[in-house]
Image: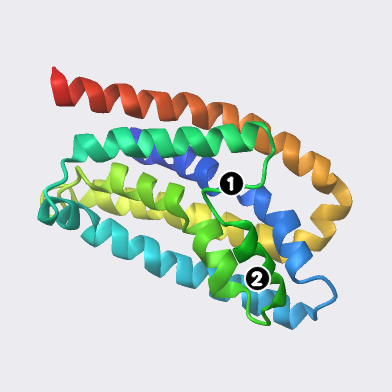
Amino acid sequence: MLEQPLKFFVVFFVVVEPVSLIPLFDGLTHGATWRYKRWMALKAVLVAAAILLLFALGGAPFLRLMGISLEAFRIFGGLLLFLLALEMVFARESGTRTSSNEAAESRRRADISVFPIAFPFIAGPGALATILLWFGPVHIASQTVLFLGLLVAAALVLAISLVMMWLAEPLMRVIGVTGANVAGRLLGVILGALAVQFVIDGVRRAFF
């Protein structure tokens, strides 16, 4: 029973990549008061949690309503995560999270909690696809413990993200942008392998 939540925790942690939030949050809140930074980080995590919970509860029924099989979404989700992994490995600005125009807009906003922190950086396409892939096959009525275990794993990742943002300024002095990129590359390699496995599982279940 613990195996699935543990696996999900690793995958979700790599997808959300809390380490990448350190330079992003520090740059967007540079020169702001500690009270402002604390509230922006907390609000971003709460909004992201609401989005992710909505997808966890209603994602699978929505796919069935649209006539999309879980196997098809597993293949697409794997490809999407693989693209995200490539961006992490090469330390490129993630096009799967935000465009250059959106990034420019975020620098002009006073409230950066909902956009771009909560969405698309925490609860972005990769995170939402991961939620659907793991929560989709789970039946809440008959697998309540597993469902709650996955929720706890997601909550832990969000809690880690919150702490990373609260400590962004001192952490940036320690690891710097280069350290964050190195950590992101290592996590990207792991995510790439997991993404390929998602595609393989989706193809196997769809055709065999």
The local secondary structure at tag 1 comes to: loop
Query: Residue 62's spot in the image, x, y percent?
Result: 18, 58
In the rendered view, tell whether residue 47 sits above or below residue 62: below
User: Dot 1, crowdedness within 10 Å: few (<14), some or many (≥20)?
Assistant: many
Viewer-proximal residue, 50 or 192? 192
Query: Residue 171's spot in the image, x, y percent?
Result: 80, 54
Instruction: Kindly identify the amino acid type of the residue bearing the numbered disc 2.
Output: Ser
Q: Residue at x 36, y 47 (%)?
A: 129
Instruction: Kindly identify the amino acid type of the residue bearing the numbered disc 1.
Output: Glu
User: Which residue is disc 2 drawn over?
Assistant: 106
Q: Residue at x 81, y 46 (%)?
A: 177
User: Which quarter of the picture shows residue 27?
Assistant: bottom right
User: Which residue is disc 1 drawn over?
Assistant: 17
Counting residues from the N terminus, which is met first, the one under dot 2 or under dot 1?
A: 1
Q: In which quadrant of the rendered image does the C terminus lie?
A: top left
The local secondary structure at tag 2 comes to: helix
- Colouring style: rainbow
Count every numbered label the image shows and give the total.
2
